[in-house]
Amino acid sequence: MADPRGSRNSMQPTKSGSRRMTRSLTIVDAQNEDSSSVDSELVPSSLAAIAPVLRVANEVEKENPRVAFLCRFHAFETAHQMDVTSSGRGVRQFKTYMLHRLQKEGEQIKHFDGEEIQMYYRDFCEKNIKQGEYTKMPEEMAKFYQIATVLYDVMKTLFPSLKVDDETQRYAKEIERKKEQYEHYNILPLYAGMVKPAIMKLPEIEAAIRALRNVDNLPMPRVQSAPTIHDNIDMHEERIIKSDILDWLSSVFGFQLDTGTVEHLMDRIFKNYRSWCNYLHCKSNLNYPPRSDRQQLQLLYIGLYLLIWGEASNIRFMPECICYIFHNMATEIHGILYSNVHRVSGDIYRTETHGEESFLRNVISPIYQVLRKEAKRNKGGKASHSAWRNYDDLNEYFWSEKCFRLKWPMDTKADFFVHLDETKSAHERPNQVAAGNRKPKTNFVEVRTFWHLYRSFDRMWIFFILAFQAMVIIGWSPSGSPTAIFEEDVFRNVLSIFITSAFLNLLQATLDIILSMNAWRSLKITQILRYLLKFAVAAVWAVVLPIGYSSSVQNPTGLVRFFSNWAGGWRDQSFYNYAVAIYLLPNILAALLFLLPPLRRTMERSNLRIIVLVMWWAQPKLFIGRGMHEDMVSLLKYTLFWILLLVSKLAFSYYVEILPLVGPTKVIMRRKIHVYEWHEFFPNLPHNVGVVIAIWAPIVLVYFMDAQIWYAIYSTILGGIHGAFSHLGEIRTLGMLRSRFEAVPAAFSDRLVPSSKEEPGRIDVEADSSERKDIAKFSQMWNEFIDSMRIEDLISHRERNLLLVPYSSSKGSVVQWPPFLLASKIPVALDMAKDFKGTDDAELFSRIKIDDYMQSAVIECYETLKYILVELLSDPGEKLIIDQIGDKVSTSIQAQSFLTDFRMSGMPLLNDKLEKFLNLLLDDFENTVVQEAQIINVLQDIMEIITQDVMTHGHGILENSHSPHMDNRSDKKEQKFERININLVYNESWREKVVRLHLLLTVKESAINVPMNLEARRRITFFTNSLFMRMPYAPKVRNMLSFSVLTPYFKEDVLYSDEELNRENEDGISILFYLQNIYPDEWTNFEERIEDPKLVSVSKDKKELIREWVSYRGQTLYRTVRGMMYYRQALELQCFLEDAGDRAIFSGYRAEKKGTDHLQALADMKFTYVVSCQIYGVQKKSSQDRDRSCYNNILNLMLRYHSLRVAYIDEREEKVNGKPEKFYYSVLVKGGEKLDEEVYRIKLPGPPTEIGEGKPENQNHAIIFTRGEALQTIDMNQDNYLEEAFKMRNVLEEFVKRRRKQRKPTILGLREHIFTGSVSSLAWFMSNQETSFVTIGQRILANPLRVRFHYGHPDIFDRIFHLTRGGISKASKTINLSEDIFSGFNSTLRQGYITHHEYIQVGKGRDVGMNQISLFEAKVANGNGEQTLSRDVYRLGRRFDFYRMLSFYFTTVGFYFSSMVTVLTVYVFLYGRLYMVLSGLERSILDEPNIHSSKAALEEALATQSVFQLGLLLVLPMVMEIGLERGFRTALGHFIIMQLQLASVFFTFQLGTKAHYFGRTILHGGSKYRATGRGFVVFHAKYADNYRLYSRSHFVKGLELLILLIVYEVYGESYRSSKLYFFVTFSMWFLVASWLFAPFVFNPSGFEWQKTVDDWTDWKRWMGNRGGIGIQPEKSWESWWDGEQEHLKHTNIRGRVLEIVLAFRFFLYQYGIVYHLDISHHVTSFLVYGLSWVVMATVLVVLKMVSMGRRRFGTDFQLMFRILKGLLFLGFISVMTVLFVVCGLTVSDLFAAVLAFMPTGWALLLIGQAFRPLFGRIGLWESIKELGRAYEYVMGLIIFMPIVVLSWFPFVSEFQARLLFNQAFSRGLQISMILHGRKDTISS
């Protein structure tokens, strides 16, 4: 485990060397690097021991280069001794570099003396160690002690004969004795010396340390390890054994000597362990003998568990495995403490210490090796899930008593560890693993089949199927009314649904057996027995119910008569009723338990054997998934929701989809058809079944899909109502903000300031004073918020000044509101006073008082002006004049003679002079004398105006001010007001008042729109609105839950480089130029900010600031870290507001000493931020410029934010027994003075990221470095805001807030703001879609549906709950591709509770380009496909109650399945029409008069799927949420604009993406993480790129539908008069157009002529390039084509067969069309179809001959090849002539033949791909490939031609630019200029 004391040897040689995987920098590279980092930071990992020495050399170089040289020389010698042959990776280059440097420096340093280094050592110790011990902080002392240790080692090694004086030896001994007190630490310097940081003085910390160090009564183990060189045995034993409880555990069990701070969390940590013990009916080993120290034992157990968990590496994903390990080690603890006898060996437990890594070696590594071997069977995600065991399989091994067969210590020969050889015989398929070599799956098998959807959600499918059957039966009745069910015959027929139910249950039981077959060897006999009994019972009911039903039917016929005769004498009609009653009995009992959720919950959680036996039939006993039922209130809410929804859905389905088709169906079934237009194989098929299927099939699909539409409608309505009651959108404009701002400070104090119950005098304080204090506290936070937006360049200096609230509101008689509220109040008041004609004071004052803000502004201006003048004047007599004028004003107001004593006509002149006066005070003059003179002149003018023009008796005040003791100098007025304190203009506090007064006097109407920036407006309005929403009250910082933030990072952008900013694309556009135009106001604010020395550090140059400005607008790590560090800033401010007195509150946060030790200590105790930079160590040593840049930028982040921690995986190559071996470590570093400092290093059992998915493994290795009770997961593309960080402690209170049934949340869901919406129209679409999901969507999921899970970030986890239950994500390869949602599944299955909160938000970036978005959608669809197969979805689907199961289905995999069904409906409809049209059935049947009036029924039903297809389901929640938060007028405007910008095209296109990847994943697999890239999309995607990406998912399908529609249009003649025909077919044409051309419509410069030409050239080159080994798909069509068939190489036999079956649909075109050719002369003989195959074969043979001729004769026998082509041409002409003249071939037949034969060729191609191994063996694969190339050419040409045509017209390109970048246009961006590269000159 990790230790707060840090790494003991971080600056000392380590035990063994290691070697880095990546190449170190060469000498040439190193010369270009900073010398301070080349030596120490780029040392090869095998020489890591010399890195501390080189760091010391760099530290002392400036003070003494000679000593630095000696250190480097010592390092070089040590490196040579460690690797004499330079065999380590990078060692030779590094030693060569060091040798060159030493030679260069040695030329300048001719003489080396040991006395010099000894003297430097003494001086260093005297200056830094002796004097710093009582003045320096532990962090500084750690550095000094390490430097001194290295210097002494260098001196003793290089000068062994040197006589060391007594003082040096004394220093050395003292340093050796105390150095462990000064080590690098994470948060707590536990061994700090004399000067202890503030955090160590906190009472919580002191109490925890005292408890941990209580080891006096523990038995001391015997130390077997040898002491170190500098320790005697006694010192060594004392250090290891008597430190604390964790050191004691380490010595006993051999944990690595890094430990962590422990909390008193016994119950929470061991809740899962106790549940595990109860489940397995074994006694818990948490024992507390009588008279024992209970607290000490609890700490021992907690420490033991955390040590196990911390060192478990990948085993952390297996929580019950950890329970097993702890269970046995706790037994050893008890035995050691109380000298028990070992129950296996019979020996007494001994307290001997183990080796430091013995736990890792003996316990963790064997289990890890099992994981690793199983992961290899996965074959990179290509193997079947059933072929290997994932994390869940291995963890569930510990859910049965079999786990105790492992014994303890674990027997490595046990069945769990024995992993048989993976070798395959030659005849086995690539995807097959021999059954004998494979361990069985545990409890569940993930099989690739769509049947999982039925198996997991069987109750839903049974309900829908039975409801459909009942509605058809009722509709088939004569009346067709729902009341017909009460008729006896109809009711009897409806009862047949129970027969259907019996067969469906039989299907479910069969699937349970078949799909779990590969897990049978791991199942208990009771589970197998249950499966078999379920099947047997289902089979019995499938026989009994049909027999019983047949016996109850009068006059039976057909199959019913057969059963009736078989039943014999069972003709009692009541038998079926009795059978149904018995059949329904389990369902009735389930319904009763559903209505009593507490009873069901208790029964499921019980481990009593009798209850387990009772529940055994209902569901198999599992460790998880028990007792997930909600309380009664929640159950009633979501039950009511679904009852209303289902009633609406079924009513719509009955009246719109089913009933209108019943009548036509009856007519069709009665009609006899004898004439067909093709060769009919089944002409005597009864009731025209083919036609009925063709008509009803799309309706059935729509019926099963449209519940998704109803869910969208109901969730939108309910979500809007829920949001309105949550007070969302109450403040959504600046006008609303101004109207309610007066209540904001009180709301802030109520919600975000802890209550001061301990202040007894608070009740007696006057209300006004309390209000002012609230406003003063509010102003601290508000002003920090405003300043943060100024730093972020969202607002300008002027806007900041208008938004700030003064701190010192207590000094005035009125509240000082921010100036933007008081805009224009003073000018209006002046005009009002000037124009006032009356003499009644009350009337004028009443007009002013009508507006509270105006009254406040007038009084504040008067008081502020008086204060400024009094402070400015130096002469007491002149100050007295000001006071007398003020007294006169006060007395006049009291006497109601103000208008008599003061002339209002002089006020405008006074106002003008005051403006000039204030401007002079604020101007920066180089000559102070000139400024003073001008100020005096204007001041005298002001006083003259006041006394002469404004006051009626003002001259009297001046005369009375003369003192009788004054000298005889002249009493001229000009001599007054000449003495001022000019230094006041440099006083910040006084100057702020001048600025504010100037704003109040000068700001006009324009300030009402402050701020102008839309993002600043959104943040201000959301924050103020959230203060009025329901949230928990804020606790004090000391009492709040501590939390950590964890961000996984791989190799994304950290900070953009100068090259990246200025690199121009093919249009001449750079990222910097693009952003300057996208964010012009923010760029202007940035330029203003960098000129202000108060806001920008002088050390930063402009280029660095520009890099940061751009990076903060991208999706970079810099942006994320800055946002998350706002948490710490907010905590420090909150600590200040809690601890500061009234004086400090009214003085202001920044005026006081900001960032005191106490504030920082509390912030450190409550907040930790860890970024898991997985390959940081690789980047550190890399020679690649990008990697080096990432390393330096991450290092700079650590140096800037000292509380930031970076975790990474370090790989070293160390020699063991002379052989190199790789070792892996989890390392935590923090920022030091110039470089990073290692805090913890934990050895791992192997490479952690090879086992599972990359991101969850990256999170898992770093999670041990997090702290606290809560953990927020933040992705790399997120942002945070200071004002939102202020609400974090309120959110954390949700974990402890009282709720019904005492349920505490385990995951808190937070809303997100998508900040990438302004880049383009596509980004806007995605922003709206994501915003609606993370707001209204998750709002409904959490309440009332109770099925919200974890959908990524920024959710907050109950850290203790999840670290004991498998972590914050799941990591099994492929199946857990969407790792985030599985953590939500896991939390729910383990009785967790997930909520959603919208009063706080976190920023989130999304993909902004078409290809990026499609890759993201593909990844999500892949993930949902894998979810469908997973055990988590199966268990949730089976164990939720019925209505919660519906919620779960339609909000997860059901949405994607519905998307696929939507597309499938189009196919089924068109293929059904194709069958009817080509066979002639449509002409024969559907033109009948009885059917003519009902022809629109089908179109009415199909209109439903069109709504889904066009993306309207996604738009509904968007419109509702925008309307709720920004007004419905705005929402309507956005909806119209989105449609004009072709949002429906975009959503229809993405529908195809979802359907394709979801279906392919379930059938064939192939899921993988798809890196989308998060940059700015300002480039044009080439045609070849789009073709590669969308060919199979959209283009092929689009062209197939296009052919279907053409054939239907050409040969179909019926439905033309239907009103809905146009809408239905239009939606299908729209689908085709979207799928074929959306990528080009949304491609920048997609219709620019020159780019179109370049794209064509590039595509032709790509098509012509040959493939081969190592050729990337981007370079060659052949390589890409092979890659597209990758899924067929690894699919199972079911997948291949299904591919072939689906390919047969393309033969229908040829079969149907050839009978409609004129040349066929209406002959319907099968011979016609046979002749068409002769033609097809002839064409293929000719093409093959030409291809072979080109290859064989094209080069050496040109003449022969030309003759061959000539003969073929003549033969073709001859044949065509005969066909035209003799056989009656027509031109239309040629076009029809293309439609007929092209699909046939495609079918042959698909079948050939499925049989690739076979065709490869017989030598036909090259022919298949050439056929494929020909089809690709044809498809490419068809798609490219419209693009060429549109590119001819320049206006199309301009229109497209406006379409794509309309949002930018609305903000003044001329994107057309950008896209064409006509760049203005912009100074940077």
Image: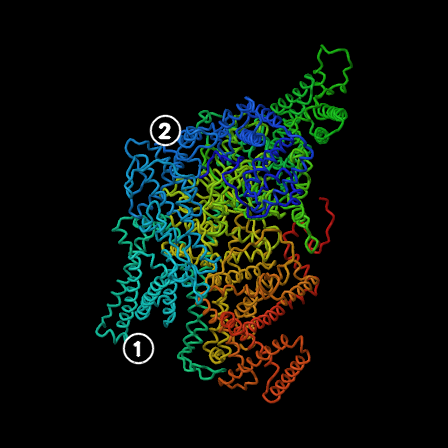
Q: Quarter of the image holding residue 964?
A: top right
Left/right of residue 1589 with respect to residue 528 in the rendered view: right
Judged from this view, the residue extending furthest toward the bottom is: 1782
| Residue in the image at 51% along x and 82% along y | 1729
Q: CA distance from mark 2 to mark 1?
A: 91 Å
How many other residues sit within 10 Å of disc 2, few (<14), some (14-19) or many (≥20)?
A: few
Viewer-side residue, 1040 vs 869:
1040
Q: Which mark is residue 216?
A: 2
What percent of the width, then of the height, locates residue 1260? 47, 46
Judged from this view, the residue extending furthest toward the right is: 970
What residue type is disc 1 on? Thr
Considering the numbered disc 1 on the image, is that residue within a helix, a strand or a loop? loop
Considering the numbered disc 2 on the image, is that residue within a helix, a strand or a loop? loop
Q: Is residue 234 above or below residue 520?
A: above
What percent of the width, then of the height, locates residue 669? 41, 77
Using the rendered image of the protein, determine whether residue 755 is visible from the camera's viewpoint: yes
The residue under label 1 is 557
Using the rendered image of the protein, determine whether residue 1387 is visible from the camera's viewpoint: no
Judged from this view, the residue extending furthest toward the top is: 965
Q: Which mark is residue 614?
A: none
Judged from this view, the residue extending furthest toward the left is: 569
What residue type is disc 2 on? Asp
Sequence order check: which comes first, mark 2 or mark 1?
2
Left/right of residue 531 with respect to residue 1855 in the rendered view: left
**Quadrant where the C terminus is found in the figure:** top right
Q: Is residue 172 above or below residue 1009?
A: above
What percent of the width, then of the height, locates residue 244? 41, 32
Asked if marks 2 and 1 touch (Cβ < 8 Å), the reply is no
